[in-house]
Image (tube, rainbow, N blue to C red):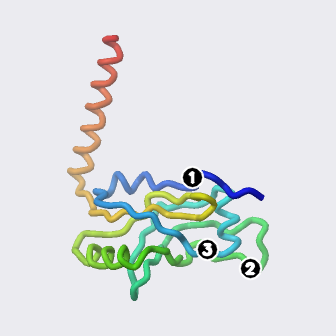
Amino acid sequence: MPREKGRKVIAQNRRARHDYHIDDTYEAGIVLTGTEVKSLRAGRASLVEGFAHVKRGEVWLENVHIPEYRHGTWTNHSARRPRKLLLHRDEIAKLMTKTSEPGRTLVPLSLYFSEGNAKVELALARGKRQYDKRRDIAEREAQRDIERALRRRR
């Protein structure tokens, strides 16, 4: 069977870009069981309440919901189990120092297959205040209005 090419997005966390200022992004591999991979290939996952943290020199992904594989047996996985992420040692060291700063967290932005391997895009993020969210929405709406006016003019 030929190896998959390109990038196939399984799930995205659109809410993260609304709730957080994204400072930096990282691509990490995920340690999965067989039924988890099959469930992901079926396109079923949710990153909504997910977060990552560094514990004893390893990065762990928590609260990401990968539902049980429908055709699985007793070997099926738990839907919200912690999953180990695969990063380079220097990236983990950077994340350890940056997440120890107050107000910083690791948030999953998207879950995808890249060249046949399951990957997650992690963001080093700072939480937004309510007035920041309102300002972003106002800027987006103003930009939309400008684009509409320009289209009408043409």
Residue 8 higher or lower than 142, as above or below: below
At label 2, counting other C-alpha atoms closer than 10 Å, the crowd grade (few under 14, some 14-19, many 20 or more) is few
Going by the numbered disc 3, the residue's amino acid type is Leu
In front: mark 3 or mark 2? Answer: 3
Tag 2 or tag 1, which sits nearer the N-term? 1
* Residues at marks 3 and 2, CA–CA distance in whole angstroms: 13 Å
Going by the numbered disc 1, the residue's amino acid type is Arg
Identify the disc placed on residue 32.
3
Element assignment for label 3: loop
Q: Residue at x 27, y 62 (%)?
A: 127
Report the residue marked by disc 2.
75
Q: Residue at x 79, y 67 (%)?
A: 71
Identify the disc placed on residue 7.
1
Going by the numbered disc 2, the residue's amino acid type is Thr
* Residues at marks 1 and 2, CA–CA distance in whole angstroms: 28 Å
Residue 139 drawn at (x, y percent) = 25, 38
